[in-house]
Amino acid sequence: MKLVISKQTVTLPLVFIAVFYGTAFALFFAKGDPFFLFNFMYIGTTLAAGFFLTGALPAEKKDTGRKLTQLFVGLYLLCYVGIFLKEDLQIEGFWFYLFSGVFAGATIHYFVAKIAGPFIFGRGWCGWACWSAMVFDLLPWKEPAGGKRKPFGFFRYIHCVGIAAVAAFLYFGTTFGKTFYENPHLELRWLLAGNAVYYLTGIMLAAILKDNRAFCKYVCPVPVFQKAGNACSLLKITIDPEKCIGCKKCERSCPMQVPILTYKTGNMRVGSTECIACLKCTHVCSRNALSYAFKAKSKSGRSV
């Protein structure tokens, strides 16, 4: 199998290396903990390798890069950081750490992956690293059946606010939350229980709605954090109107059911905050009309 190596295939990997290695050294010098070097350099290298394979492999194999990255990053964060090191990187862990004024573990994870990161990579976390989606993407309903149930998406906001409210009550109204980050066994129990509920809910929703990503669309609270950054992300799916023939293969392949072709006119960049940068739309386009890139210009000179 021949790899295509070009400026385009190495540009994004180098961006990931620069961002994550820079974060690794910055946190290492700030906190003095060598774990940050290993953690962010590992994730950055894995993402870079995945994006390199995505660009270099033939069209029918391109999703292999994303799947491998999703597996290696997802298992690392869940099994090593989560279960072995007993760090609860889920949303309740974020709130307990935040209320405690602790910038470590869940707070760093949320800041880098889900608050600051989307300003550069959009919702790349959801497409490339999430350990919940890592399991959901293995289910058989890869192309959603039926239309998107838009009103149900509002539950994500209720879920997010509800978890914050419960965490605030437990922290400020009891002694429980104040010792959360000092009790790794407690963190581990919350991590395991929360993941069990998420996996069960996600698999059930996928089976009922025939949609692998139903949990992401209607339940997951993480997009609430990501949407602001994702709306003005530096990297977005770009459509070249000179190449696009409107066949809608991209829309049919999109696991988040983003109406991609509505962005064919105007600024030509997919602005939906539901885009998870999985790049499936770019793989199925026989005209190579879609790409995941910084703002550029088409051959006609128009901004895209």
Image: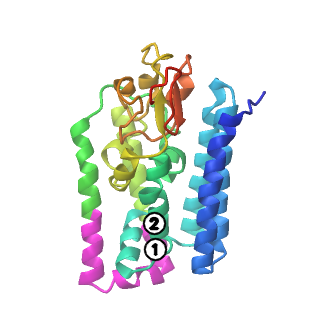
User: What residue is shown at x 28% (from left), y 67% (from top)?
Assistant: 164
Marks 2/1 in contact by CB < 8 Å: the verdict is yes
- Look at label 1 and name its amino acid: Glu
Query: Looking at the picture, how far across and down is residue 153, in whole percent?
Result: 27, 43
Label 1: how many Cα within 10 Å (few below 14, some 14–19, many 20+)? many
Taking depth in this image into account, of 191 and 116 the one nearest to the observer is 116
- Disc number placed over residue 151 in the picture, else none: none
For the C terminus, give its image quadrant: top left
Query: Looking at the picture, how far across and down is residue 300, in whole percent?
Result: 49, 20
Taking depth in this image into account, of 168 and 57 the one nearest to the observer is 57
What is the residue that sits farthest to the left in this orientation? 151
User: What residue is shown at x 45% (from left), y 58% (from top)?
Assistant: 116
- Look at label 2 and name its amino acid: Leu
Question: Label 2 vs label 1: CA separation?
Answer: 6 Å
Q: Is residue 180 magenta?
A: yes
Q: What colouring method underlies this structural image?
A: rainbow
In the image, the segment drawn in magenta is 163-190
Along the horizontal axis of the image, is 120 left or right of 63?
left
In terms of secondary structure, where does tag 2 sit? helix
Q: Is residue 97 magenta?
A: no
Task: Tell me the residue that label 1 is attached to.
Answer: 187
User: What residue is shown at x 51% (from left), y 38% (from top)?
Assistant: 278
Taking depth in this image into account, of 77 and 277 the one nearest to the observer is 277
